[in-house]
Image: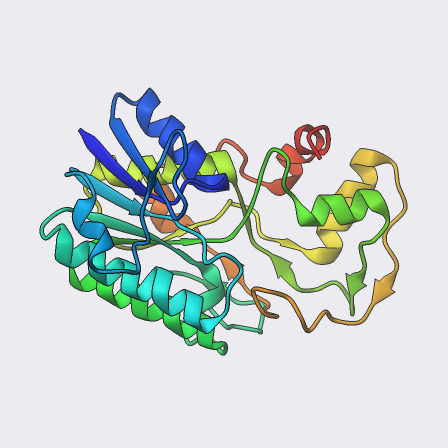
Amino acid sequence: MKLLLIGHGYLGREVARVFREGGWQVATVSLSGGPDSLACDVGGPDAVKSLPAADFIVHCAASGRGGADAYQHVYVNGCRNLVERFSGVPLLFTSSTSVYAQIDGSVVTEESSAVPERETGRLLMEAERVTLAAGGVVARLSGIYGPGRSVILKKFLTGEARIEEDGRRFLNQIHRDDAARAVFHLAHSGAAGVFNISDSTPLSQLACYQALSRIFARPLPPEGPRDPTRKRGWTHKQVSNAKLRASGWQAQFPSFVDAAQGIAATL
């Protein structure tokens, strides 16, 4: 089996490793290319014509921290170009749970309303529609953390963390390794439709910091105002992974707390 992997960054490298470990041949693609990836701008319709044949495609490229124009180019145009170039080849697009704009603390499933407030979120939804119309898979990922990467833990350990308002806002996260294994699982299962990729334990911000205080024997962060500049927006929801678990996937790290000590040593 041949995988065409669009995006060779933090998540993509682990996806490539998991698929290769599973016996797949993997061709990786990044914007600038490199010694272990092909150079291709998937937002350009002519560029994708040179990409190799595949049995499955994963689009997990980053937007380069760009705004709406970058989202349109990389995600919407990228998915459209891949679907047109590789007609009949299953496509998995990694979207984001930020498309759920709920602020009432409710549990959200794949059937819940997804009406993002930001233009970038609406463009993710458009890329999702392109993927689903082609019979593909949309994987809505919570905030990714893992070796060398955890904004929450890094701010806690450096003393920069603040408990926003009363700390009630839920934090929905997924370990990088669990996310990569979920992508592999969905590819093997022949799944289609939307799946939330999130851990099994949404934590309120207060509960998260209380757990970290116990683990690392440090005081709770002080209270502070809400951060209006959050990249993923300010939402308050509990993302359910029940559909993914029912399909046979299980998280190695069901909670951020399970991984915190191991991650701290890599930051």
- Left or right: 221, with 234 as reference point: right
Task: Name which quarter of the figure residue 182 lies in.
Answer: top left
Between 212 and 70, the one lying in front of the other is 70
169 vs 126, nearest the viewer = 126
- Where residue 144 appears, as percent x and y from the top left, is 54, 47
Please tell me whether residue 34 is drawn above or below residue 106 in the rendered image: above
Q: Position of residue 238 (x, y in %)?
A: 53, 59
| Vertical arrangement, residue 84 with respect to residue 262, above or below | below
Residue 132 quadrant: bottom left
For residue 139, side relative to residue 98 (left or right): left
**For the point 72% across and 28% down, which residue is it?**
265
Task: Give the residue displayed 26% in from the left and 21% down from the top.
Answer: 23
Q: Is residue 111 visible?
A: no
Q: Is residue 71 visible?
A: yes
Q: Nearer the viewer, residue 257 or 12?
A: 12
Q: Residue at x 44, y 33 (%)?
A: 14
Q: Quadrant of the C terminus?
A: top right
